[in-house]
Amino acid sequence: MESTNKNKHLDLDKRYEIQHGLDDSLSFKAIGAAIGKDCTTISKEVRAHIIYEKKGAPYRPFNDCANRTHCTHYGDACDECTRKNKKNCRSCGSCIPACPDYEKELCPLHTKPPYVCNGCSVRNTCTLEKHLYNARYAQKEYEDLRSESRSGFNLTEKELKQLNSVVSPLLMNGQSIHHILTNNPDKILRCEKTIYTYVDNGLFDGRNVDMPRKVRFRVRKNKSVPLKVDKACRKGRTYDDYLKYREEHPELPVVELDSVEGIKGGAVLLTIHFVLQKFQLAFLRPANDSQSVIDIFNDIYDLLGKKLFMKLFPILLCDNGTEFSNPEALEYSSDGELRSRVFYCNPSAPNEKGACENNHEFIRRVIPKGKDIGKYTQEQIDLMMNHINSYSRPELGNKPPYAMLSFIYGKKVLKLFRFEIIKPNDIILKPSLLKKAKKNNS
């Protein structure tokens, strides 16, 4: 047995070993042991490259109808049978799409390992759809996918539209890209070289001709580009700094920040989670940039006032996303007064703000992953959060989060956050909640 190779792609030789192992009816565990891979790797590989063949057996055409063994049709299901002197329909492969009694039969072996027919003992006599694994076919699919993933720009249409709306008008006004990025750091989460590349390739309405000096320059040699997010902003704000600050100020409550995405490059939600009360707010943002987060906190500051804001948001704990890359704008008000302290979790450690992550499960019940959040309004998001915050929690003594927030900070806070109490039996935590709200609004 070879030693396990982590982070290594399968090559054609290993795929041939997988194919031969399937032909010999070996288990995924046995195949994985032979090539030095985990059994889950073999399972994912096989399921990702299945070939579907609608192929029958010798002298028996393809037929996956569940009623084929006791079919009562005799030359009346399709024109093909009629032309062949009323041939028995169960021996005709052309009747399937036309027969009114057709019912597809699924092979139970396709729903469990090994998911394919390579080592099936009745493969040569079966007339159902075949699921096969072929090493050469799998290698070609892998190479095509790898080539496609490494070509083009790592940019969705919505991200391009958002960047274009910011860069192009300023570019056509005669501003340089450096000037644009310097004065809009929270709206453009790309480095200067990347923006130049987008302009060079005609992705924006603004063109090279809009930069009089740019068209006179020679093509520069490649050089390293610094990261857009300056890691210096995390100095004094690490998770260890957070733990130390909590020891020094145990009486201060913690608020956890995170983003909930729908589709890549689309609208997102900023979630603000009050850990002690398990009360969560959600704000709709058209793009996942830091400026939208700053704007939301400035609006909340103006809404609550200095005293109440500092009482509710003394400590902010967030992840390392680019939307939280300007901590000073969150910590200080417009008049330069310190209003909060921002800290960052360690990279790839969502458990360090697990309360917020766990509460996202309620949001995902209403807005599943992959759904475009941009199709909803802030009023609909507020309605969803009203239902979530009215949901009783055992860790709160079977009280809902809004009751705990109201008990500690007063009912005035609920009114300022536009919260409306939902009766326990009226709570809906399914996608139908927002569909119903949309129908009522229309």
Image (cartoon, helix red, strand yellow):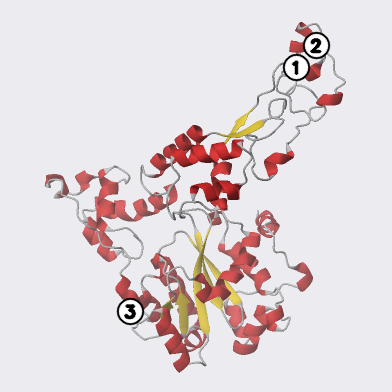
In this view, the residue in front, 335 or 310, is 310
Whether residue 77 can be seen here:
no
Q: Is 191 on the left or on the right of 70, as rendered?
A: left
| First in residue order: circle 2 vs circle 3 | 2
Indicate the position of residue 65 as horizontal and vertical percent values. 77, 28
Q: Residue at x 79, y 9 (%)?
A: 82
Amino acid carrying label 3: it is: Lys
Circle 2 is placed at which residue position? Answer: 87
Amino acid carrying label 2: it is: Lys
**Cα–Cα gap, marks 1 and 2:** 7 Å
Of labels 2 and 3, the one closer to you: 2
Secondary element at image label 2: loop
Circle 1 is placed at which residue position? Answer: 92
Circle 3 is placed at which residue position? Answer: 235
Secondary element at image label 3: loop
Indicate the position of residue 204 as horizontal and vertical percent values. 32, 46
- The number of numbered badges drawn on the structure is 3
Amino acid carrying label 1: it is: Cys
Q: Residue at x 58, y 48 (%)?
A: 30
**Cα–Cα gap, marks 2 and 3:** 81 Å
